[in-house]
Every structure is written in structure tokens, then in C-alpha cells.
Amino acid sequence: MKSKVLATIILGAAAILLVAALALDFGGPKPTAGQQSPATTDPVATSPAAQPTDGPATAGTAEPSGESKKESAPEQSAPKPEATRPSWDPQPSATESRLEVPQAAKPSKFALPDTPKREPVLETAPKSSVAEGKLVKGFPKAAVPVPESTSIVQSSVQNQAKKVLVGVEGRSSDSVDEVLDFYAKHFEELNWLTTQSAPVEGTTQLSGSYGADSTTVTVRQLPTGATSIVAAGIFEVQE
């Protein structure tokens, strides 16, 4: 009996030693001082994720960024614009108004009157002179006429090259209106433009002119009942 127990103990000890030996063999040799432990090796170099593979990416591999996804996606062509008709219609409708070129204006039936022919008032220049109580010799009555019922106070003629200044002052027994009518008729015969004004109260001024020729007559009623006449004209000699 003792021998069986002893054999069992020996067999158990042998089994323990065998297991210990096998454990040492599987653990491998211990690293020396010049060698690094497998735990200190670079994880990047030994990691299988760092090495490219032909197969599908595993959970440990990094997913491609958004830009790479856009680049890898197939490009879609932009839709081509459809041809549209113009908004205007080349063929106008019957109700559409169209611009028309206006017709040439017809000549007017009204026209300006013909300009009357005006004869020169002075063809020769009289000599310069001044006279009291009468008209100077050669006084141009055709240029500055005097009513018959007029008494001369003074008269004058001044020759300035081709310009002649004529003046006369007198008293007439005719009324103011009669004297004005006399000179208005004279201007009308010469085809002169005539204007009338009242520069001073009680005084009437009648003017006639054409071109370089003009005559101004000032008429007023005197306290004596006579009509004062002062006529002055300037004329251009037409030789």
C-alpha cells in the first residue's frame, strides 16, 4: 500500500515538472539587454491597419474624407437649357398698332405779305444851317413835313458825312389829334413802322422808322390853345 502511494506522489511530481518545462518552452527566450521587448515596438509599423490591402477596409481603417468622396463620385452633366421663342412676335397681330411715318406737311395757304418797296428819303445832303422863325434854305420837307397852319419857331439842318439831322419847332392852330393824323399819314406813305406813346402827361409822341431813317414828333396842347410841334429826324443819305 505504501508503495502505491509513493508511486502516485512521484508521478504527480513528474507531471508538475513536465508542465513547468512546457510552459518555459512556449514563453520563448527572455530578451537580453540589447534587444527590445515586443511591447516597446512601434505600433504603427506592426499594425496591420497601416499596411494597404486589396480587400475591403476593416473597422480599424480610416474612412475617406468628404472631398475624396466627391471626387470619386461620378460627375453629373449640367442640364442643357431648352430653346425658347422670343417674347416678341415677328408677325404683329391685327390689333397691334404700328408706327407710321407722318406725311409731309402741306404748304400753308397763308403767307407773309410782300415787303413794300421803300424809296430813300434823302438822295442829297443839304447844307448845315439854323434859322429862327422860318425854315432853313433847302429844308427837306419830304423827310420832315410841317402842317400848313404852322408858324415856325426855329429850324435846323446838320450834315454829318452821310448822316443828316433835321429839326423843326412850331405852333399850329390844328388840334393835337389833327397834327398826329397828319404825321401818321406821312409815315404810312413812307411804309414806315409807327409807334405812339405818352412819355409825359399831356404830351403825345409819335415815332416812325425804317432802317437807318427815323423821325419822332412830340405834340402837346399849349395854354393858349395852340398845338406845340417839335419834330426831329435822322436820315442816311442814299447817293
Image (cartoon, rainbow, N blue to C red):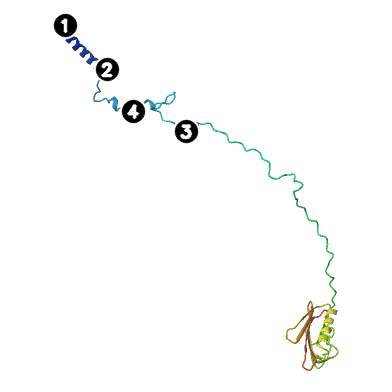
> Could you tell me which secondary element the residue under label 2 belongs to?
helix
Q: What residue is disc 4 on?
A: 43
Amino acid type of the residue that numbered disc 3 sits on in the rendered structure: Ser
Give the CA distance from mark 3 to mark 2: 47 Å
Looking at the image, is mark 1 or mark 4 earlier in the sequence?
1
Q: Whole-percent x and y of residue 27?
A: 26, 19
Res 55 → quadrant: top left
The label nearer to you, 3 versus 1, is 1
Give the CA distance from mark 3 to mark 1: 77 Å
Amino acid type of the residue that numbered disc 1 sits on in the rendered structure: Lys
Looking at the image, is mark 2 or mark 1 earlier in the sequence?
1
Q: What residue is disc 2 on?
A: 26
Q: What residue is disc 1 on?
A: 4
Binning the other alpha carbons within 10 Å of mark 4 as few (below 14), some (14 to 19) or many (20 upward) gives few
Q: Whole-percent x and y of residue 8?
A: 18, 9
Give the CA distance from mark 2 to mark 1: 33 Å
Q: Is residue 239 left or right of residue 7?
A: right
Q: Which residues are magenta?
A: 65-72
Looking at the rendered structure, which numbered label has been put on residue 68? 3
Binning the other alpha carbons within 10 Å of mark 1 as few (below 14), some (14 to 19) or many (20 upward) gives few
Q: Whole-percent x and y of residue 76?
A: 56, 33
Amino acid type of the residue that numbered disc 2 sits on in the rendered structure: Phe
> Could you tell me which secondary element the residue under label 3 belongs to?
helix
Say whether marks 3 and 2 touch (CB < 8 Å): no
